[in-house]
Image (tube, rainbow, N blue to C red):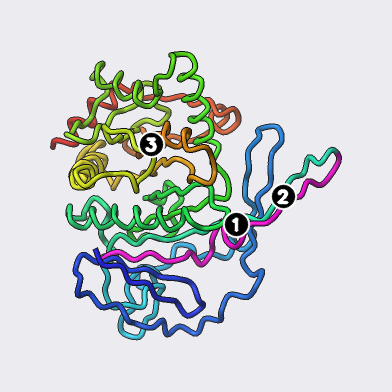
Amino acid sequence: MKKTSNRLADGREIVYYDTRDDAVREAVDQRPLDPAAPGATVSEIRFDPLLAEWSAVTAHRQSRTYHPPADECPLCPSRSGRFTEIPERDYEVAVFENRFPSFAGEPGATRADGPQGLFAHRPGAGRCEVVCFTADHQASFADLTERQARLVLDAWTDRTAQLSQLPGVAQVFCFENRGEEIGVTLGHPHGQIYAYPFTTPRTARMMRSAAEHRERTGGRNLFDDVVDAELADGSRVVLAGSHWIAFVPHAARWPYEVHLYPRRRVPDLTALDEAERAEFPGVYLALLRGFDRIFGPGEPPTPYIAGWHQAPVAAAGARGEREEFALHLELFTVRRAPGKLKFLAGSESGMNVFINDVPPEAAAQRLREAASE
């Protein structure tokens, strides 16, 4: 893999990843963009004392690009006088700082305002990046070759390593949203990476559960035990490789939801070995292509969210806690049947109690069939 770092017209970083060592990436961003003014991108995080969770307030994101025509896509290469976020005329994988980030800037002190200091807030430090998987606007991740998918994995890994070193970053989340039903506003195949200034609530909850399990079982690891239990049961296993295992979780919340784990527990993408990296593209592409066949021929591509759950960075917690966490990818769709979506209504949005219309065992059976078609 060859990595080339350049700058866009307003000073944001763009990084190209290529499979060829002789690839040259020297194109200059010719757009008349002014350097970002101090304070133009303002993100603030606020603490909810009832839930003990942080949320972000980002007023500048109201003006972000929204459903542009295909011939004005900002993620396509720059060609024939039409300049985009990617100055090159072609690329394999390109990663750049988001123009409208949810988190940006340097960390700052927490202020606790209001009676009893209940209104805690601080700058929403961190970084948000866009990952363009391919220059082909009409493609999707499932259309990539295994070589291309491996390059994306290498890019995710490199970005995880780089972003984990930034001041104030507590966790790195690589993810893809696909489909307008999910809320995607740019149709080009791409994902994002968030470098959060706190450990996310979902990860913190998993780590608490793992600590309680370890205490209750005399030192056993919860993630290992869950994977072993799913393998022993077998009814929800979708794919099983030499180094990766994919299954529908016993208590799946979404109609079709798959968790993909390396068989060897590692805390994040940087800890995968070469054998695990080599097998990942084939397993993941089979899952994504199966997702597109769930609902039968003639149905539009399945909307989905796919995200890597990684341990908080070393500076955010004790080393022992990081080593107890298990890297895994969660993939799910909001479509529950042809032409029908799973909406997060009263119970899900109001009380965080999910109600799933598709039994996990039935979902696993359909996914096994679809992955092998």
Query: Which residue type carries mark 1?
Result: Ala
* Residue assigned mark 1: 125
Vertical placement of 201 versus 133: above or below? Answer: above
Vertical placement of 336 versus 193: above or below? Answer: above
* Residue assigned mark 2: 110
Label 2: which secondary element: loop
Graded by Cα atoms within 10 Å as few (under 14), some (14 to 19) or many (20 or more), the crowding at tag 1 reads many
Query: Percent x, y for residue 76?
Result: 33, 70
Circles 3 and 1: CB distance less than 8 Å? no
Vertical placement of 55 versus 100: above or below? Answer: above
Q: How many labels does the image show?
A: 3
* Residue assigned mark 3: 340
* Highlighted magenta segment, given as a residue range: 92-115
- Gap in angstroms between the C-alphas marked 2 and 1: 12 Å
Between 300 and 167, the one lying in front of the other is 167
Task: Specify the quadrant of the image occupied by residue 131.
Answer: bottom left
Residue sticking out furthest to the left: 373
